[in-house]
Image (cartoon, grey):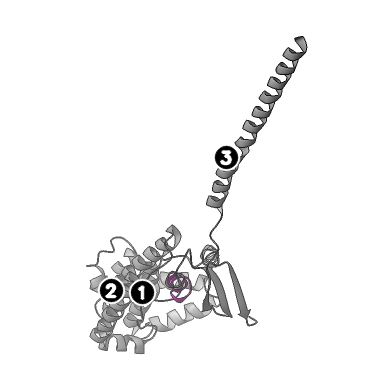
Amino acid sequence: MKSAIYTIFFLTLLSCKKEKQISTDKIPADSLTVQTTKKSDTVPTKPNQQVFNFVTDLCTSKGYFDANKYTEEEIKGAYTLWFDLRGIMLDTPSVFSLQDLTEIRRDNAKILAKLDKDFAEKKAFLEHLTVVNVPYWQNIKKLQYESLLQKYEMEKLRIAAYSDPSILLKSNTGNKCRNFTTALNSTDEQMFSEWKKLREQMSKMNADPERIINLFNEHLNSPDKKDYAAIDLITFGWGNCMNGEIQSPSHDGRMNQEFESLFIKIDADCDEP
């Protein structure tokens, strides 16, 4: 009788252990399914590699970019801001000599009309320029646009001022560069005094300071001294001063890095500098 009871008890225990083992085996199966799902969610999308060809001063390059992140049009827009728009956006004549002064006074209306046309085209171009949709490049585009507006207003005043300096007094430039504006609309004595100060400052920044002062003295003793004074005070005085007030994008190492970071890799064929 006891033997029968032990046998039944032993079989009962064995049955319980098997049930527990089977139940434990089911847990990893469910857990593995969840982990597999999580892993598949975190697998990065395979790059859709495409090529953008571009040139710089010394190099012809192929940039390989991920079309899943950027379009070719966006890359091209960033390249335009980075490389093509480094220089002067508006083409206006410079005035350094009496002949330049005569021509800009004679052709004043024609030059202003050309400036208006050039500005309208550049403005429309920037407005429709598609760039990479990240804060850095969107901000560069905004700065470039604002810089264009400011440069246009400045150039209109500069061109007109060679014929009528009083237009600078009527402008909304406030106290910016006021010393040059005042000198151009003052007595000859005040005008020549400010002119002399300007030339002295210019000589300190020139490799041949003596030449700058000698040229000033030569022009001061010329019958055209008022015209020479107007050229310097508008071109090198007011003009350079106002250029310094224009907020333009910095084409620096940061911009180079931001442009290069748009690519997976860049293959460049460069000439010797």
Q: Is residue 79 inside the magenta stretch? A: yes
SS under mark 1 = helix
In-front residue for pair 76/41? 41
Which residue position holds label 2?
157
Q: Is residue 266 above or below residue 95?
A: above
The magenta stretch spans which residues? 77-87
- Look at label 2 and name its amino acid: Leu
Q: Quarter of the image for the N terminus: give it.
A: top right
Q: Quadrant of residue 146?
A: bottom left
Residue 28 appears anywhere in the view: yes
Q: Nearer the viewer, residue 243 or 241?
A: 243
The residue that mark 1 highlights is: 233
Q: Earlier in the sequence, mark 1 or mark 2?
A: 2
Q: Amino acid at mark 3?
A: Asp
Q: Secondary structure at mark 2?
A: helix
Instruction: Tell me which residue sits at (29%, 80%) in the image.
Output: 115
